[in-house]
Image: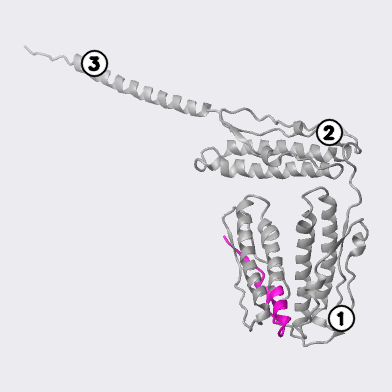
Amino acid sequence: MKRYRSNTGGSNNRRWRVAGVAGVAVAIVGAGLGVAAAAEGDAIPTVNCPTVADKLGAVPAQAQDEVARNLQLLNTQITEANNRIRTTQGQGGAAFIDNAILGPLKDKRFSTINRIETAIGRVIDKPDLNAEGLSGCTLNENGGGDVSPEPTEVPEAAASSGAAVVADVPTVNCPEVVIDVAIPAQAQAEIDRNLALLDTQISEANTRLKNTVGQGGAAFIDNAILGPLEDKRFATINRMETAIGRNAAKPDLDAEGLAPCSLNEAGAGGDEAAEEPTAAPTTEAPANNGGNNGGGNNNAGGVNDGTGTVNCPDVVINVAIPAQAQAEIDRNLALLQTQIDEANARIKSSAGQGGAAFIDNAILGPLADKRLSTINRMETAIGRNAAKPDLNAETLSVCSLNS
């Protein structure tokens, strides 16, 4: 008799094991989906900023539009910050939001609130809205929507309310630059450009006087307008000396004496105070003018990500320094380093601002002007007690960027 062994039990066991494995797999997948769903359901944080509109009080009619535009800009800045939080989730480390979003937002808000103060201050006493306190924002960790907190309609006040309306705005009063030496033909175009630039500098200073009424304290105009104007004029006059000196004896146009400007307190002068290009006799000179063709900054600065540093040529004084000039030379050499340190600090503090040409226009360009003025001051200091040297200020003033 043949005996048959039943394997029914084994099959059942195998089926049970297969079913068990499948069940565990489903459970794991289900758990994973649950975790993913939970992660996706997590609320994205949003920025939480102090309101500004409710701190304003009555706003003069003349400032109404500008204040409203800046209040709307505060809303736009918040919306942009919230969008960036959403689109950069998972990027950076623990401090990413603070450094890349909340920090820049604070800088933008600070500038915007100050513009509101200035707009009001052109008509009545400039208010203190506590820009520092109102510019910083925190996070709503559990979300909180994207609602703009600032109303853009502000209470209007008559222009005569509060303090008196701002009186006539002063204008700058600058000495005329007279070139009393023969100008080589090769230098004429550059001389004309720089005389026109002196006009432009005066016009820009007068415009800034109008646009910043009420800003700063007693020394604001001296420090923020007349001081920078003096540096620009000094550099421009020295460029004219250098342009002539490439093809003739380098003249001393008294840059130090002609650079400083004063104020027409009652607003007299205005654009009439601008330079009138002074004609000078032209003389022929050798066709080869040598040297470079003027200052300016042709270095590519690039987008400011806050990581670059400036790279400036060493200033070497290869002539004997009179004892009477040594202290002034030392001060100006130290100033060159201070200017580099300030430029590097500005690159860091303004990371993310502006476009591709921001560093060129806002940092390297002004740095070149400052260095040109400083190097020319050293030439002048030596020239008071010895032959005035040519330290090649135009070439040494231009810095590039270590990316």
How crowded is the residue under tag 1: few (<14 C-alpha within 10 Å), some, or many (20+)? few
Q: CA distance from mark 1 to mark 3?
A: 114 Å
- Quadrant location of the N terminus in the rendered image: top left
Question: Magenta region: which residues?
Answer: 376-403
Q: Is residue 221 above or below residue 145?
A: below
Disc 2 is placed on an element classified as loop
Mark 1 touching mark 3, by CB under 8 A?
A: no
Whichever of callouts 1 and 3 sits on the residue coming sooner in the sequence is 3
- Amino acid carrying label 2: it is Ala
- Give the CA distance from mark 3 to mark 2: 86 Å
The reply to whether callout 3 and callout 2 are in contact (CB within 8 Å) is: no
Please give the residue where the numbered disc 1 appears in the rendered image: 180
Q: What residue sits right under mark 2 in the picture?
A: 58
Q: Which mark is residue 12?
A: 3
Residue 82 in the magenta stretch? The answer is: no
Q: Is residue 33 above or below residue 254?
A: above
Q: Residues within 10 Å of mark 2 (few under 14, many from 20)?
A: some
Determine the residue positioned at 68% across, 29% down. 147
When the figure is inspected, residue 267 is found, relative to residue 25, above or below; the finding is below
Q: In percent of the image, x 64 and y 81: which residue is there?
A: 321
Quick check: 162 left or right of 402?
right
Taking the spot 91% from the left edge, 51% from the top edge, the residue there is 168
Residue 297 visible here: no
